[in-house]
Amino acid sequence: MEYLEIFKDWLFDLGEEHEVNPWLLAMLYLISKPLFFFFLGWTIKNMKNRKPFMSQLLTACVCFSIPYLYVIIAGRNISVWVYVFIAVVYSYGGFTIYKKVTAPADPTLPA
């Protein structure tokens, strides 16, 4: 239990140092990820049905970006490696979305 207390203190000290609220960041992250997967699924469904899908795809991208944008906008004195990490996360996210959206439909799954 002592390790959790030490971790919590370290996390909140880090948040104060960089002017980022850890609770707000966690809430943004936990809320944005289910919304991201919902809109991504809706995008894939619309693509399979040959319906317009750009608004759902853009909304999925915004949902994916919310916690990272909070760190970029609100954070102060943040190390360069954090920005590199965020860029890697965006790149990997974009790549996986592209692969998922352009993958051929599995004929064994129901439509």
Image (cartoon, rainbow, N blue to C red):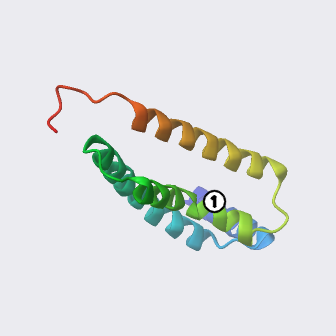
Q: Secondary structure at mark 1?
A: helix
What is the x, y in percent for residue 18? 78, 68
Q: Residue at x 36, y 50 (%)?
A: 43
Q: Is residue 104 above or below residue 20?
A: above
Residue 89 located left or right of residue 40:
right
What is the x, y in percent for residue 36? 43, 56
In which quadrant of the rendered view does residue 54 lie? bottom left
Where is the C terminus found, in terms of image quarters? Answer: top left
**Residue beneath disc 1:** 68
In which quadrant of the rendered view does residue 5 lie? bottom right
Q: Residue at x 43, y 60 (%)?
A: 55
User: Would you call the spot at circle 1 few (<14 residues within 10 Å), some (14-19), or many (20 or more)?
Assistant: some
What is the x, y in percent for residue 51? 30, 50
What is the x, y in percent for residue 57? 44, 53
Query: Is 30 or 110 nearer to us in this picture?
Result: 110
User: Residue flagged by tag 1: what amino acid is it?
Assistant: Tyr
Query: Is 44 or 91 nearer to us in this picture?
Result: 44
In which quadrant of the rendered view does residue 17 lie? bottom right
Residue 54 located left or right of residue 78:
left
Q: Is residue 98 above or below residue 8?
A: above
Query: Is 70 or 58 nearer to us in this picture?
Result: 58
